Each structure stands twice: as C-alpha cells, then as structure tokens.
Image (cartoon, grey):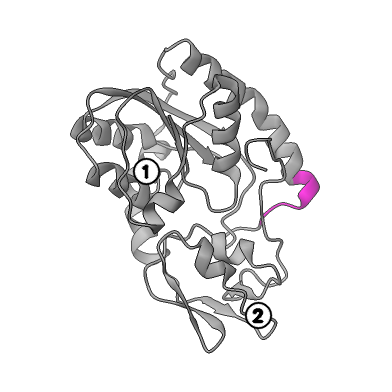
Amino acid sequence: MICYFSGTGNSKYVACRISEALADSMLVNLNDVIKKNNKLSIDQGPVIIVTPTYAWRIPAVVEKLIRDNAPYNNIDAYFVMTCGGEIGNAGKYVRALCAKTGLNYKGVAGVVMPENYIAMFSAPDSDTALNIVNDAEKSIDSIISVIRAKDSFPQSKLTLIDRLYSNVVNPVFYSFCVKDKSFYAKDNCISCKKCAALCPLNNIKIVDGKPSWQGNCTHCMACICGCPTRAIEYGKKSVNQPRYHCPKQTATQS
C-alpha cells in the first residue's frame, strides 16, 4: 500500500514510481482522503507514505490523519519525503508518531526534487526542474531496492543544524508562515473553481466569482500552481515567478 500527499506533483511522481516498481496497485491519494474526511484504512503492510517536507518534518495534516486513524497492527511503515534540499531530523518525529500509532517504523528517506514552495522561494525553470527530477531517479531506485528487500532505510548522520531545523524552525514556520492572507486572485480569474477542487482542506470558497481563502491553509501550493490562467498570487513573492508542476509523468499518473 502506497499513500501520498502532493500539492504540485513531486510526491505523487515518487509514489507512482514506487508503485510501478513494486507492482503495488494500492495507491492512495491522501489529498482526497483528507478532503472528503474519509478514514485512512491501513490493515496490511508494508505501507509506504510519500509526502513533501514541510519545514523539515512531514506535513502536519498528514501526521494528524495518521494519528486520527490509529491504532495500526504493527504494520511496517516506510516514509519517503520529497524535499528541496534536506529533511533535517524528520525521522525523530516520524519514529515517535509510529510508536504512538502502532506502526512499525522502517525509517525515513529523502528525495531531492525541484523547489515548489513559491510562497517563499522561486521555482526552477522547466529545464532545470527536469534535470533535478532526472538526478533524483537514483535515489528513488535505492528506496525501491530497500523496500523490496524488506530492509529499513539507513539513518543519515545528523548535524546540530538538522536538529534545530526540525525542532525549532518547524513550529515557528507553522506559527508565522503558514497563513493564507497573502493569497489573492487577479482579474484574469475565469471562475473555473479548479483551485477549490484542488485544495485538500476545502479552504477555498468561490465568492463573487473569485476564490476566497478561509484561514485553514497548509501551504501545499496546489491552488496557486494549479491555476490555469495564473490568476492567483501570493503577495508580491509570486509575481512573475514560475509556477511548478512535476515535469515527469508515468503511466500510473496519466
């Protein structure tokens, strides 16, 4: 069973690659599970959970989903985290989550993918993004080999910075950065409602033909990067900046 949470396609791509390699057809989109307030049923293993890295931990919405649907019956759980650079000390918090929910922790592995957090950083152009994804293929293959062998992911050496990122920066990030007040729609909005459909937290309502954010955002960037007319902006940061979608597709994703 492979579960993924993905705003702009990085984690979805990695999850689909793993699914295809392991011939595992049980592919669960956690965005849909969260959006529909469905139960996450994990009754057989192993389970591979693929998520982006939010301030050097798994997204809080995914952690909550796993916690709310516990307990699990000592099922082996692998966590794969896509990131722009590193995953910090995410393993510490995932291990604790597994201990609390009855999952058997099999480790955390990071996969460096193109930057998509355009609320704070610039996304790469399409050619650079494709090169980064191509470079990530070896890491994905290594992850597949470990899971296929039923081994645990090797633990990376941690630095003091890694610990500070996950321990100190993460709560600051959620307290001060994860806000939706800076999102707005320009006049080229066509009222297609795609942003509302993409939002995993049902945080977007269409008011007078334009999206209105309701204060419960996880900063997945699905709305701003999925807008077909690039009508959505995030303050001044996103103006004239590339929108990002994973440039590679697999048969499973099409």
Q: Residue at x 67, y 86 (%)?
A: 187
Residue 249 position within the rendered picture, expressed as x and y whole percent measured from the top left: 69, 40
- Magenta span of residues: 123-128
Q: Is residue 160 above or below residue 151?
A: below
Q: Residues within 10 Å of mark 2 (few under 14, many from 20)?
A: some
Q: Is residue 84 visible?
A: no
Q: Is residue 125 magenta?
A: yes
Residue 211 sits above or below residue 35 on the image:
below
How far is disc 2 from disc 1 in space, using C-alphas?
37 Å
Question: In the image, what residue occupies the spot 35% across and 52% down?
Answer: 61
Identified at 38% across, 24% down, the residue is 107
Q: Is residue 154 above or below residue 128?
A: above
The answer, for residue 148, to whether it is visible in the render is yes
Q: Nearer the viewer, residue 234 or 51?
A: 51
Q: Secondary structure at mark 2?
A: loop
Point out residue 130 in the picture as x, y percentages from the top left corner. 75, 41
> Residue 191: which quarter of the image?
bottom right
Q: Quadrant of residue 250?
A: top right
Secondary structure at badge 1 equals helix
Q: Residue at x 70, y 31 (%)?
A: 135
On the rendered image, what quadrant is the C terminus found in? top right
- x and y percent of residue 26 in the render? 47, 32
Indicate yes or no whether the magenta region holds residue 208.
Answer: no
Kind of residue at badge 1: Ser
**Is 47 left, or right, of 109 in this rendering?**
left
Residue sitting at the far top: 149
Mark seen at residue 189: 2
User: Which labelled disc corresponds to residue 166?
Assistant: 1
Front residue of 95/189: it is 189
Describe residue 233's horizontal placement relative to residue 216 as left or right: right
Please tell me whether mark 2 or mark 1 is closer to you in this view.
2
Quarter of the image with the N terminus in it: top left
